[in-house]
Image (cartoon, rainbow, N blue to C red):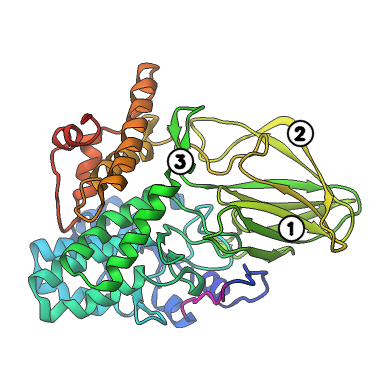
Amino acid sequence: MRIFSMATSIVIAITTGAHAELTSSEVEIDFQQPPPSVAAAMEPSVVTLSDTEVDRIEKIGSYALIDGYPYYQYWQLGDANSWVRHPSALGGAMYALFKNNRGRLPELIDEAMKTAVSLRNGGLTWFYPEVYPLSRMVGPKVHYSALSQSTLLAATMHMARADHKKYEPLLRRVAKGIEYDYHQGGVLWQKGVFLELPLFYSPPEIILNGWLHALLNYGDYVTEFPNLENRAIWNRNIRYLVDLLPSFDDPENRISLYSNTTPLHLRVLSDSVPTRVDYVPLDKRFPKYSVSLREMEAPEINGVRKDSPFDTQITSRKGAATLVRATCNALYETRIVSTKPIQASYSRGLYDPLKASPPRGEQVMLLEGRPLGDGSYVVSFNAKTPGVFCGYPTNFAKPGNRNLYHAYHVVALAYLGEHPFVNPKQRAVLVDFARRWDSYTREREASGDRFYEYANVLSLINKHKLLRRRVDWEKLRSLTIDSH
C-alpha cells in the first residue's frame, strides 16, 4: 500500500490569507475553514492499493476500510488504484453498515468524528481533503458540498428512524450542516439554494444536479423530521428552483446546462490596470459581490501548483496587457473596473458536446469600456454577450460518450414533482422542464447521441434515500412526463 502525504498542501490551503476573497457591501462574509488539526487528522488522504491489497483489505460495501475509515476508489487522481477520503463515501459506508452490520456503526462514527468540523450554527460536516484535481476544488480553500452532505443526511435519517434516541442528535447536526449559510462558509445560499460546491472567489455557482440531489434527500428530511425551519428552507428552495430553471435550458443546442456559471479568460488591453471585478445582480433577490484583483498564489497539490479557473484573479501580465480570469454567472453582470479607460478581448467560446467547458474559438471578441461617472471605467459582460457562456451544456464525456447529468435532470425533476410539499403550480413547472428536456433526449438520441437510461438514474437516486416514493421509472414517467 502506497500512501501519499498531502498534509503540507492542505495546511497551505487552509491557513493562507494572501488572497483576495469575495466581498460584499450587502452581506457579511466570513468563510469558515477547518483548523489545520483536521487536515492532519485526514492523513493519509490518498492511498494506492495493489489488486492483491484490494482483494485482502476489509470492505464496507464498495468502500475500503483503511485504519477504520472508508476510502473511495477515485481514478481521476491519476491512478486507477487510488483510494481517497470522500464525504459521500462516508455517508455510503454509514448506510451500508446500517443495512448489514449495525453493531459496527458506533465504531465508524467515532473514527469519523476525528475529522468532523463543528460549524458556527451547531452543524457538523466533513470537508474534502485538497487532493482532488477538479477545476472547482483546487485553489486556496477547501470545500464541503451540499451533495455529499445530503448523502450523509440520508444515512443518518435511516439511523435516527431506527434508533431515535441514539442517532437523532447526530442527524440534527448533519442537517444543520446542509443548512449552514454560504456567506459563513456553508452550502445554503440566500436561505434557499443548496450549493454542490461553493465558490469563494466568485459568486456562487448553482450546479443543477447537485441542487436536485440535495433536494431529493432534504425533501425526505422535511417529511419525516419536520420543523418550521426546515420546511421554510424547503419552500424557499423549491421557489428558487421553479424561478431559475429557465436559466438551465439551452434550446439552441437542445440540452440542459450543467450549471449557471462559466469562467472567462480576458486580455485587458492598453496601459489600464484593472483593480477589481464587480458582480452586479440581475435579480434583486441576490447580493452584489466584488473581488479585488491580484495574482493569486496557487496551492500545491500532488507536487503541482494549481489554481481554479473559477477564481476571480489576475493570471499574468504580458507587456501592456493584463490577463484576467472572471466568471460569467447567469444571475449577474460581470464588470471589470479600472481607474483608466479600459478595453478587453476574449476568444469566442464554442460548444463541444464532449467537453465540460467551452473550447476557445479563433474569433477574438472585443469589449469596449465605458466611464462609470465616478472617475473609474468598466468593461462588462453577461449571459447576452456574444460568444460568452454563462453555464455550459451537460456533456457526453462519460464512458461510452453518454450523458449522465441531462438524464439526471429529467428524472430528478419528475421525482421532485411528486413530493407532497410541492404545490400544483410548482409541480407543473418542474414536470414541464422534465418533459421539455426529455424531448431533447429523444431528439438527440435520434441523431445518435447516448444518454444514461432513466431507469438506472432512478435507481441511483434511490440508492440511499429514506423515502423511495417511486421505484418504477415507467410508472413515474406516466404520472409526470406523459401526463397531459
Three-letter residue code for mark 2: Val
* Position in image of residue 102 (x %, y %): 9, 70
Q: Residue furthest top?
A: 447
Q: Mark number for residue 314?
A: 1
Quadrant of the snapshot with the N terminus: bottom left
Viewer-proximal residue, 73 or 353?
353
Residues at circles 1 and 3 in contact by the CB criterion of under 8 Å: no
Residue located beneath label 3 in the image: 246
Residue located beneath label 2 in the image: 364
Magenta-drawn segment:
27-34
Q: Residues within 10 Å of mark 1 (few under 14, many from 20)?
A: many
* Position in image of residue 456 (x %, y %): 22, 38
Q: Nearer the viewer, mark 1 or mark 2?
A: 2
Residue at 51 percent of width and 35 percent of height: 355
Q: Pick whichever of labels 1 and 2 is earlier in the sequence.
A: 1
Q: Nearer the viewer, mark 2 or mark 3?
A: 3
33 is within the stretch colored magenta: yes
Residue 82 in view here: no
